Image (tube, rainbow, N blue to C red):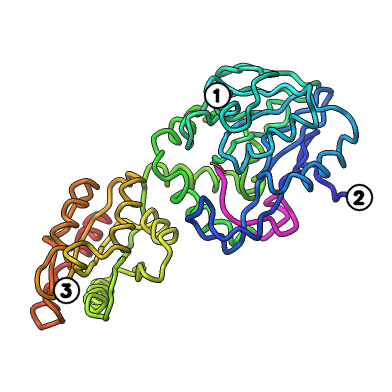
Amino acid sequence: MEPKSIIKGKVNYIGVNDRSKYLFEGMWPLPYGVSYNSYLIDDEKVVLVDTVDINFFEVYLRKIKSIIGDKPIDYLLIHHMEPDHSGSIRLIKEHYPNITIIGNKQTFGMIEGYYGVTDGEMLVKDGDELTLGHHKLRFYMTPMVHWPETMMTFDETDGVLFSGDGFGCFGALDGGFIDNRINTDKYWDEMIRYYSNIVGKYGGPVQKALQKLMGIPVTTICSTHGPVWSEHINKVIDIYDRLSRYEAEDGVVIAYGSMYGNTEEMAEAIARELSDQGVKNIVMHNVSKSNASYILADIFRYKGLIIGSPTYSNQIYPEIESLLSKILIREIKGRYLGLFGSFTWAGAAVKRMGEFAEKSKFEMVSSPIEMKQSMKDENYQQCYELANAMAKKLKNDDQ
Ligand code: FEO
């Protein structure tokens, strides 16, 4: 017999945990795994809320049947079409051929494209409602959080918000699935990492969604990743609000590449001086070792960013180049930027990073600094000046 799964009213948790995948989207490490959450509303009308990754279909179907037995499912409510949630649509349709799929005008083209399903669809618009018996659902369109078809559904009867990826986080669920019955410590950092890696570019649409949801009496958030939020709703909303406004704490991220330790010495000198100037939050990332996932999370967290690159075949060091691309994709706003670099016979990295500085629209705290071959007194001096300029900006913001 399957364990209890009730969240509230007739809403059940039927998600699955993925503890095998190394890289989410082929890029982002999953040290604590990830959950693909789905929900089943066992009302007079039965509603399946999103599905799970297709690899988990067998266990997923067993969970569904443990609640409703051989009863049919009336509706499949789709909030988001990324295959970690939509992956089981075709198989659900095969098992429940009379099911009606609820989505918006962006949803159905994707369902046909991914799964070849074209019938039994019910199109809903912003504000539409659906009564199931005990529960009454209202649909909210929240496009581009972080795909065009993303939407959310509010259960007006019990205050449950089905939010898709919104308010989600990395981290599998180790036993319990509701926040007030588990230790939530690991999820807070994993939420910042999830947001910055997956949703990061779409701060504007997330803000629009938050404004739309303002005033709705939410008591429970059922996202598609991570715990069901009940006790910590305000904290979760606050994190998504701050991150989507690109609001940052005092602190500096130093991300650098170094092949033989010379550029790293610049990073060390800058960090030491930042500390001497009273900056407490300093995070150093050697890009050859730190996965960009964690660097991005720290860039979302802190106001200051200092990037260092050796010149490599007349280019930016490739690992730094890759990081710069990931930063630009996310259109992070309002950071202070410092740049440093090195070369052996002809400088190129620092000059080329100037293009990144322009595109990012970050505020440069001083001119970029560049070292030839190894650290001399003048290079230490340049590093101290860069660190001082950054520390001053942060201090001025505090006043
Ligand atoms: Fe969890 Fe955007 O899929």
Residue nearer the viewer, 243 or 96: 96
Three-letter code for the amino acid on which mark 1 is drawn: Gly
Is residue 212 highlighted in magenta?
A: no
Mark 3 = which residue?
Answer: 384
The CA distance from mark 3 to mark 2 is: 65 Å
Determine the residue positioned at 56% across, 50% down: 169
Q: Assess disc 1: are there few (<14), some (14-19) or many (≥20) residues with their C-alpha within 10 Å of its C-alpha.
A: some
- 268 lies left or right of 49: left
Is residue 169 highlighted in magenta?
A: yes
Label 3 close to label 2 by CB (< 8 Å): no
Segment tinted magenta in the rendering: 167-183
Disc assigned to residue 109: 1
Three-letter code for the amino acid on which mark 3 is drawn: Tyr
Residue nearer the viewer, 42 or 238: 42
Q: Is residue 382 above or below residue 172?
A: below
Q: Position of residue 326 (x, y in %)?
A: 35, 52
Three-letter code for the amino acid on which mark 2 is drawn: Met
Mark 2 = which residue?
Answer: 1
Nearer the N terminus, badge 1 or badge 3? 1
